[in-house]
Image: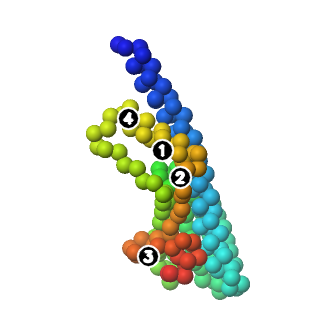
C-alpha cells in the first residue's frame, strides 16, 4: 500500500465531501428562494384584480372568489430536499382541472462526465463544479413549464397567463 497515494485519495474525498455539503446547502437555499417567488407570483397574479381572498398553509396557497378557489400546491420540504434544482407543483382550478408544472433550474454550463471515469476523477470534476457554483461563476436561472406543454415562461405570472 502506497501511503502517498492513499493520502491523495483521502484528500480528494475530504475536499469533495466538504464542497458537496456547502453546495447542497446553497442549492437548497436557492430552491427555497425560488419557491417563495412561485408563491409570491401566484398571489400577485390574483392580487392585481383586487377581488380575490387568500388562504395559506405550509404547502398551499388558495385564491378565492365567491366560494370558488384556485389552489397552488408545492411541497416545500420534498422539493427542497430533492436533488437538482427543479421544483414541481400543481395548480388546481375551481373547475377541478389540475395543471402540473415544473420550475426548471438552468445553468450556463452543463458538464457531463465520460461514462468510464473512475470515482477519483469524478470527485475531482464534481468538486470543481461545486467550487464554481459556490464562487458565483455559474449563472443560474429558472424557467416555468406546464407539463405537457412546450412553452416555458420566465415568471409565475407569465405561466399563469399562459394557462
- The residue at which mark 1 appears reads as 129
The picture places residue 91, in percent across and down from the top left corner, at 52, 73
Mark closer to the chain start, 2 or 1: 1
- Label 4 and label 1: CA atoms lie apart by 12 Å
- Which residue is at the far left? 116
| Residue occupying image coordinates x 65% and y 84% | 65
| Residue 30: assigned label | none
- The residue at which mark 3 appears reads as 151
- The residue at which mark 4 appears reads as 121
- Residue 51 is left or right of residue 38, and the answer is right
> Tag 3, which secondary structure?
loop
> Tag 1, which secondary structure?
helix
Q: Between residues 59 and 40, which one lies in front from this camera angle?
A: 40
* Residue 124 visible in the snapshot: yes
Q: Between residues 26 and 100, which one lies in front from this camera angle?
A: 26
Q: Residues within 10 Å of mark 4 (few under 14, many from 20)?
A: few
Foreground mark, 3 or 4, reads: 4
- Label 2 and label 1: CA atoms lie apart by 9 Å
Vertical comparison of 10 with 74: above or below = above
Amino acid at each position: 500500500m502506497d501511503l502517498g497515494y492513499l493520502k491523495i485519495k483521502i484528500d480528494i474525498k475530504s475536499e469533495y465531501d466538504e464542497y458537496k455539503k456547502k453546495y447542497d446547502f446553497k442549492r437548497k437555499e436557492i430552491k427555497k428562494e425560488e419557491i417563495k417567488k412561485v408563491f409570491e407570483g401566484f398571489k400577485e397574479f390574483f392580487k392585481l384584480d383586487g377581488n380575490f381572498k387568500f388562504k395559506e398553509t405550509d404547502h398551499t396557497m388558495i385564491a378565492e372568489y365567491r366560494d370558488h378557489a384556485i389552489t397552488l400546491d408545492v411541497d416545500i420540504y420534498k422539493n427542497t430536499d430533492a436533488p437538482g434544482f427543479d421544483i414541481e407543483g400543481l395548480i388546481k382550478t375551481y373547475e377541478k382541472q389540475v395543471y402540473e408544472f415544473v420550475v426548471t433550474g438552468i445553468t450556463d454550463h452543463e458538464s457531463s462526465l465520460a461514462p468510464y471515469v473512475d470515482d477519483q476523477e469524478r470527485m475531482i470534476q464534481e468538486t470543481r463544479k461545486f467550487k464554481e457554483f459556490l464562487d458565483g461563476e455559474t449563472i443560474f436561472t429558472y424557467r416555468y413549464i406546464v407539463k405537457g406543454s412546450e412553452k416555458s415562461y420566465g415568471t409565475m405570472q407569465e405561466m399563469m397567463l399562459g394557462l
